[in-house]
Image: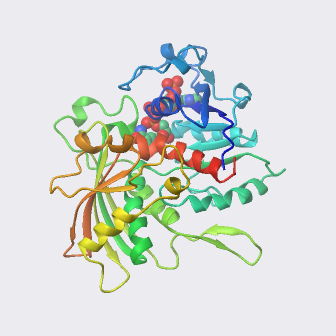
Amino acid sequence: MHDFRKINVGVLGATGTVGQRFITLLADHPFFILHALGASQRSAGKPYPAAVTWKQTKPVPAVVRNLVVRECKPEFFTECEIIFSGLDADVAGPIEESFRLAEFAVFSNAKNYRRDPHVPLIVPLVNSSHMAMIPQQRALHTPPLRKGFILTNANCSTTGVVVPLAALEKTFGPIESCMVTTMQAISGAGYPGLPSLDIMDNVVPYISGEEEKIEWEMLKILGGLTEGDDGNKAFDMHAKQPLRVSAMCNRVPVIEGHTECVSVRFARRPPPSPQQVREALLAYTSDAWTMSCPSAPRHTVFVHEEPDRPQPRLDRDYQAGAGVNVGRVRQCPVLDIKFVVLANNVAIGAATSSILNAELAVCKGII
Ligand SMILES: NC(=O)c1ccc[n+]([C@@H]2O[C@H](COP(=O)([O-])OP(=O)(O)OC[C@H]3O[C@@H](n4cnc5c(N)ncnc54)[C@H](OP(=O)(O)O)[C@@H]3O)[C@@H](O)[C@H]2O)c1
């Protein structure tokens, strides 16, 4: 249980799209105090409002108005325990590692450590049990770390789809195939994103590396943790029932909120009906909610009954973007069941996931 001692946190990449969302979400947080901000050398040394191109609907929070942006070096963050990283993947690798080595708990949005066999890849509404890997990650360092670790959240499109799939696997057992076609918002590419002449009046049927991320990350997140005879843990990548995933990713002229059309085939025969699927999605509750994490959504999966929902403009901010929207649950003539998912890529797809992961780590006594 959290002892209500507030914890100082730092945000790396604080001037970016994800960094700005961290700041709005952490400005008045019951567990955490925004204490230090980091970005590139272009921004370092400037007061935060002068360094940032602020693109949020709320004004820059008072708590950061007088903070000066620092370089992303551990020595400038010594009064923090937790580091949230919204760093560009081109630079996140060595910077996040330097913070882990300096005994910070690092919660990253970047892709760099997601495939590391000792780094948990956690969607907080799905697999918080994977935090059990953290002691092994610490122990493997020479000398072993006492407090430092890296924990990543998933790619924003992976996050949307794994939440309903986890709910379905919990109720109906393993899924053996999944086809997912995404319609991804421009903000998923960071600021300033694609030139308007490339994305207005258009759909771009390619997002570099995105399909491979979804196909691989889903296995790590939905799989379990195994323990060998030597006591060492490993991620099993859904090995007990192989899961085949095919993803097709598109960029569309939407500012925020990734929409995904999903078809699944269950291992069990006969498969569940659309009504049973709806009920299972509605009944699904995350550990984050049962452990009373302050940012957890009441409805992990909100199921829409209207035939034309969810829609990004109307539904992306429901529950502050912390839950996942599902609609159009129906029979699939090729696989078993198909439905539409909408997840806010900047909230549950990025900053909210990291914050929920940190809240879970506090509630579980890992921090
Ligand atoms: N956008 C999304 O929906 C989303 C969702 C999930 C995950 N992610 C991941 O989250 C990360 C951030 O994405 P974003 O969309 O927020 O990107 P972004 O808007 O381009 O922001 C990048 C941040 O990284 C900082 N940075 C760049 N080079 C740096 C350097 N050499 N040293 C220190 N800081 C540096 C930038 O600081 P300056 O302003 O000083 O340049 C900025 O704060 C990426 O790894 C991305 O893949 C994004």
Residue 325 x/y as whole percent: 31, 53
Q: Position of residue 290 (x, y in %)?
A: 52, 57
Q: Is residue 77 above or below residue 353?
A: above
Residue 95 appears in the picture as rendered? no
Name, please, the residue furthest toward the bottom.
269
User: Residue 204's spot in the image, x, y percent?
Assistant: 25, 45
User: Residue at coordinates 48% horizontally, 34% vertically from top-left?
Assistant: 25
Q: Nearer the viewer, residue 77 or 306?
A: 306
Q: How is the image coloured?
A: rainbow
Tell me: residue 179, above or below residue 90.
below
Is residue 292 toward the left or the right of residue 281 in the image? right
Q: Residue at x 35, y 25 (%)?
A: 57
Point 15% across, 57% down: residue: 307
Q: Compared to 4, does 217 lie above or below? A: below
How many marks can you see? 0
**Looking at the picture, how far across and down is residue 49, in whole percent?**
49, 15
Q: Is residue 359 left or right of residue 171?
A: right
The quarter holding residue 235 reads: bottom right
Q: Nearer the viewer, residue 194 or 333?
A: 333
For the question of whether residue 134 can be seen, the reply is yes
Report whether 11 appears left or right of 59.
right
Is 99 placed left or right of 349 in the picture?
Answer: right
